[in-house]
Image (cartoon, rainbow, N blue to C red):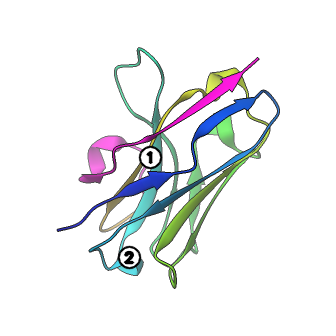
Amino acid sequence: QVHVVESGGGLVQAGGSLRLSCTTPGLTFDDYVMGWFRQAPGGKQRAGVSCISANGGNTYYTRSVKGRFTISRDNAKSTLYLQMNSLNPEDTAMYYCATRAGDCYLAASWYNIWGQGTQVTVSS
């Protein structure tokens, strides 16, 4: 059975940084696209933040995080990362890791394996 486990969330002041990690026990990690999504407090939908191709060669970001967030993966460690810099209160959300076969999309509906999320809170 495949699991997705996120970690690294927390409380940080505006302008600070956090690094999220995601592991996928039971998954052949380097065969799959990986994505980060977030759901703001009271938000109805999970919004795509970033995704990375299976070999790490292609990355995509939503406009609001470009230049601040960096997605990466270490296939040898079966681990996905999201380095988040220059955080602002609008980044406050539950962050989810998800995986899919095929191409990289920033739409949550394309992903079928999800973690439980890790909370990121940015104070002003």
Task: State the residue at coordinates (36%, 67%).
Answer: 24
Dot 1: element = loop
Q: Is residue 107 magenta?
A: yes
Q: Nearer the viewer, residue 107 or 76?
A: 76
In the rendered image, the vertical position of residue 20 relative to residue 32, given as above or below: above
Identify which amino acid the numbered label 1 is placed on: Leu
Task: State the residue at coordinates (50%, 52%).
Answer: 7
Task: State the residue at coordinates (43%, 61%).
Answer: 34
> Outermost residue toward the bottom?
76
Give the crowd class for mark 1: few <14, some 14-19, many >=20 residues within 10 Å.
many
Q: Residue 29 — which label?
A: 2
Q: Position of residue 19 (x, y in %)?
A: 65, 52
Q: Which one is earlier in the sequence, the residue at label 2 or at label 1?
A: 2
Give the crowd class for mark 2: few <14, some 14-19, many >=20 residues within 10 Å.
many
The residue identified by callout 1 is 106
Which quadrant of the view contains residue 27? bottom left
Task: State the residue at coordinates (76%, 17%).
Answer: 124
Task: Answer whether labels 2 and 1 touch (C-beta < 8 Å).
Answer: no
Identify which amino acid the numbered label 2 is placed on: Phe
Q: Nearer the viewer, residue 120 or 83?
A: 120
56 sits left or right of 35 in the view: right
The mark closer to the camera, 2 or 1, is 2
| Magenta-colored span | 104-124
Q: Position of residue 110 (x, y in %)?
A: 29, 50
